[in-house]
Image: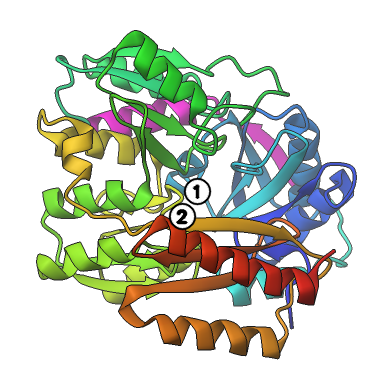
């Protein structure tokens, strides 16, 4: 059965349109039935729609005899780490403020499989009752902060760093973590008002962070997304250091023999790992697929170019703050630009093509595969439907920027002709 509501990272949509309190209530009820009842830790990010959707989700949990434990504003990795029989986050991650969503974790803090999400969708029309309860736990954020600082922190007393909190769930937590470790912190986008999450800030828009780094003359900056499971960086000149480069720095520093990445990962990363004898496992796009592969392969380190970085030694999921602290330790006093330069990046050009349907026709898939095959080791093209937006994402990678742009334009035109809205 194809999933109707779940995408690559939970259920997500524009509030009042594709995502309503009614749907959130049904999701809470269905997920609690699926898990066999019990206690569900519920967190949310800083969107204005969060409290109403949190209340609706809790109604659904309670209606089937479960207990909704409300933790308030929490980063997604905190909910995963402290999940009870289930964990649920009311968040749309990096999307704009008008979006919201629901992410679910099992009792071990793992994101649900495609099959589990299909089963939950099959329970959406189940009737509710009563007998449950709502509780509050206002200590989750403090416990999470203590765990992250104690387990993943290092002496940062000589560090000045800019931290962009995306006006999201890390607005209070991340600057405090760096300060506890001794860093001099320049915090930006750390005043959420319900409508400014991810707006011209955060991991998906690094302009504010780059400007802050240059103006304050700090060695580098770190940006999170709205719910805290992504992290990106900029060097002293404000140049982007993406998830592939950060993952490469961590892989060499942590001494792993296996790294899990996705099909979006730069060819330069693969070349560097081969040079150091580190095996690379490639999955489909989505951090939960990276997590599944890490558990299957018994690995610890993986991630995505978008900044979802995962280190499973002392954690259960991807965590932007943990990744940031690991990066600080891995630099060992070097400039970020110097550490990132170990990986030669192939130029990549991307385009999001608006479409009326995200299902790729067979003839389009065959043509893309043929072009990709012709490129061999000189580049590649990748076409995939977004799991969260009505677009098809096109990526072209080549030895020169000019060739990558030409390839991207060619493939985007094919997609537009076949699927254009």
195 lies left or right of 293: right
Please state the extent of the stretch shown in magenta in the rendering.
132-150
In which quadrant will I find the C terminus? bottom right
Task: Return the residue at label 1.
Answer: 83
Task: Return the residue at label 2.
Answer: 109
Residue drawn at point x = 30 percent, y = 19 percent: 161
Assess whether mark 1 and mark 2 are in contact (beta carbons under 8 angstroms).
yes
Q: Which of marks 2 and 1 is nearer the N terminus?
A: 1
Q: Does 204 sit above or below residue 142?
A: below
Instruction: Tell me the element at label 1.
Output: loop
Q: Does 412 sit above or below residue 94?
A: below
**Distance of label 2 from label 1 (alpha carbons):** 6 Å
188 lies left or right of 123: left
Q: Which of 106 and 202 is in front in this view?
A: 202
Residue 384, which numbered label? Answer: none
Q: Which of 395 and 88 is in front in this view?
A: 395
Q: Which class describes the residues within 10 Å of circle 2: few (<14), some (14-19), or many (20+)?
A: many
In which quadrant will I find the N terminus? bottom right
Q: Which of 219 and 282 is in front in this view?
A: 219
Give how far across and how far down residue 397 sits, in percent: 42, 65
């Amino acid at each position: 059965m194809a999933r109707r509501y779940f995408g690559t990272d939970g259920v997500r949509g524009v509030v009042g349109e594709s995502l309503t309190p009614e749907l959130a209530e049904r999701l809470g009820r269905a997920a609690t039935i699926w898990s066999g009842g019990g206690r569900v830790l519920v967190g949310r990010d800083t969107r204005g729609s969060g409290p109403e959707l949190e209340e609706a989700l809790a109604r659904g949990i309670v209606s089937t005899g479960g207990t909704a434990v409300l933790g308030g504003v929490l980063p997604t990795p905190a909910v995963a780490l402290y999940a009870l029989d289930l964990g649920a986050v009311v968040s749309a991650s990096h999307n704009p403020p008008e979006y919201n969503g629901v992410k679910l974790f099992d009792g071990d803090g793992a994101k649900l499989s495609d099959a589990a999400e299909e089963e939950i969708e099959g329970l959406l029309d189940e009737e509710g009752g009563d007998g449950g309860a709502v509780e509050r736990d206002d200590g989750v954020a403090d416990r999470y902060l203590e765990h992250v600082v104690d387990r993943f922190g290092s002496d940062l007393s000589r560090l000045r760093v800019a931290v962009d909190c995306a006006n999201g769930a890390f607005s209070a937590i991340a600057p405090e973590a760096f300060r506890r470790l001794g860093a001099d912190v320049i915090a930006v986008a750390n005043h959420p008002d319900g409508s400014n999450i991810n707006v011209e800030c955060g991991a998906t828009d690094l302009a504010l962070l780059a400007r802050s780094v240059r103006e304050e003359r700090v060695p580098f900056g770190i940006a999170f997304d709205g719910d805290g499971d992504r992290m990106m960086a900029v060097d002293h000149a404000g140049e982007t250091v993406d998830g592939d480069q950060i993952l490469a720095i961590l892989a060499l520093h942590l001494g792993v023999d296996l790294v899990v990445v996705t099909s979006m990962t730069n060819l330069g990363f693969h070349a560097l790992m081969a040079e150091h004898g580190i095996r690379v496992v490639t999955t489909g796009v989505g951090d939960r697929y990276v997590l599944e592969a890490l558990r299957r392969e018994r690995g610890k380190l993986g991630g995505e170019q978008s900044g979802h970085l995962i280190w499973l030694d002392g954690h259960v999921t991807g965590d932007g703050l943990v990744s940031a602290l690991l990066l600080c330790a891995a630099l060992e006093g070097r400039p970020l630009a110097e550490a990132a330069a170990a990986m030669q990046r192939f130029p990549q050009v991307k385009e999001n093509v608006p479409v009326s349907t995200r299902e790729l026709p067979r003839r389009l898939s065959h043509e893309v595969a043929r072009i990709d095959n012709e490129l061999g080791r000189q580049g590649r093209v990748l076409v995939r439907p977004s799991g969260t937006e009505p677009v098809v994402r096109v990526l072209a990678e080549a030895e020169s920027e000019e060739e990558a742009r030409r390839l991207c334009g060619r493939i985007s035109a094919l997609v537009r002709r076949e699927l254009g809205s």
